[in-house]
Amino acid sequence: MAGARAQPDAPWLALYDPGLPPTIAREHENAVAMFDAAVRRSPDRDLVRYFETSISFAEIDELSSALAVGLRALGVARGDRVALMLQNVPQFVIALLAVWRLGAIAVPCNPMLRERELARQLADGGASGIIALESLHRETVAAAAPSAGLDFVVTTSELDLLDGPPPAVLDGVERTRAPGVPDLLELIRANAGARLEPVALGPDDIAILTYTSGTTGPPKGAMNTHGNVVFDSCIFREWLHMEDDDLILGIAPLFHITGLIAHVGLALCAATPLILAYRFDPAETARLIEAHAATVSVAAITAYLALLRDDALERHDVSSFTKAYSGGGPIPPAVVTEFERRTGVVIRSAYGLTETTSASHLTPLSARAPTDPATGALAVGIPVFNTSMRILDDDGRPVATGEVGEVAIAGPQVVPGYWNKPEETAHAIRDGELLTGDVGKVDADGWLYIVDRKKDMIVASGYKVWPREVEDVIYEHPAVHEAAVVGAPDEYRGETVHAFVSLKPGARAEPDELIAFCRERMAAYKCPRSIDVLDELPKTVSGKILRRELREPSQARDE
């Protein structure tokens, strides 16, 4: 099975969810048409719930249309790139739709970027302007804008569009509008009721430049097309059997491909409310699940770990959360087990990349992902609709079922390439097939297991060690909250295995105890030779643990 080049009609889905077809058709030519269809179907239904504030599909339609007129007056035209530097606020959805209505391309920016990083991303994408939170404008955007050559800056506040006093997570936030900088809500009010003539957009037109480090090199903009966005949004709607009583909780940051598709895209495609809460806070997340009876989300496993670490789970009923998925990083089976024990909620695994516009593999709702007996890795899912997968050796040849190699994916969700980077595109995408840079294997039932990233493999005394396998064992220790494993230089072995861990509140564990725990459970060459216990492991805003930041200090220490 793993050797076949095209297998979108593979029978795996029928084994677990016979109600779903092996293929689906793209329903709309572009993401605006997908949204317009939802407005016609459910104009009065909530599209966004910002804490307890509700904004309907029809209202978002009016707000985004007026903003599009205002942005056109600022010079935005078809094909222009407009950056969005916003947290999980309603203005993200409004601005995204406004940019698309102009036939322009949205460039979501990580709110954690600093001045130089932001300027480099804006310049690489050739952004004509940016829509940013006032707080981020003050901290970063104002300094980055001149060198990036922006034509305009528009700001907004996380306090806007709230009914009633700000919630506790916004305590201390103040309005900081810069003189002379246009305000998003003022642009909307100035153009209330105005609409643009629809722009003809096809599935091959670029909708989003989503920046990713990819498999090698500096960040580059993946060109997610309107066809990519519509197709993967509909994947989630069908796979999750979305019903009228489903509610999406926006845990993942909206600038990230998971938030863009599994939150915003799914809400537009399924005409389903999306609950936003500025940025992830475990206590507020637990409260909102109970308050809104939220049912759906896709989040990094670190978000679920944070929920387990917070006593809010004891105060709030989260049993409505029946469609909880995790992707974007390894999922330790021990965490899935503990979360179900504590809450009754099963975390199902998902797999995808920025270059696959989110999901390429998902766990069916009717199934539980198996664990690989050889490595202890939890399966990340089976291929979604219309999607083929191959496992390739170092020479690009398909390997047999059960053998390890690089994961290659083809399907309607794969991007055509990277913005203005033909060489990187040619390296990663060949005849529409994405070489993911992930090492994995597939079993006879279609389940994909990710062993690790190719670049993270450790070679100790000639033996290959995959950090994820070691991390999964460390997570089984009852005191461990988070774990990350990296290779450190070693004069004798070439590399040696080094681990970083953080502990659960009130727990104690010495490095020697953790090393002994590992030695009882795996081959000696895989075991960490040293362990650092930290208060917290560094992460991206989307929740991925940053092995790179951990690896560099360990190398410096050993050198």
Image (spheres, rainbow, N blue to C red):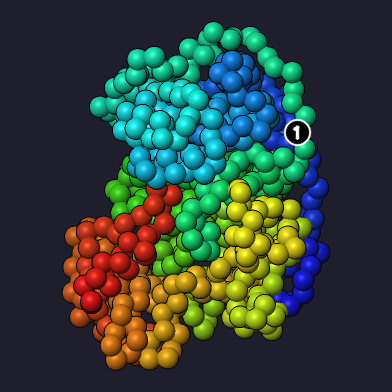
Q: In this rendering, would 281 be left or right of 82? A: left
The residue lying at 74 percent from left, 26 percent from top is: 199
Residue located 61% across and 28% down the image: 99
Q: Establish if 438 lies above or below 314.
A: below
Q: Residue at x 18, y 74 (%)?
A: 510
Q: Is residue 294 left or right of residue 4?
A: left
Q: Which image quarter is the C terminus in?
A: bottom left
Q: Amino acid at mark 1?
A: Leu
Q: Is residue 408 above or below residue 121?
A: below
Please give left or right for residue 30 compared with residue 307 in the image: right
Count neighbours of disc 1 (C-alpha within 10 A) and say few if under 14, some if 14 to 19, many if 20 or more: many
Q: Which residue is mark 1?
A: 201
Residue 302 in view here: yes
The picture places residue 139, in percent across and down from the top left corner, at: 31, 33
Residue 351 image position (x, y, % from top left): 57, 60
Considering depth in this image, is 505 or 344 the residue closer to the camera?
505
Task: Classify the position of the N terminus by image quarter.
Answer: bottom right
In which quarter of the view is residue 193 placed?
top right
SS at mark 1?
A: loop
In the rendered structure, the answer to whether residue 434 lies left or right of residue 213 reads right
The residue at the point 50 percent across, 25 percent down is 151
**166 w.r.t. 281: above or below:** above
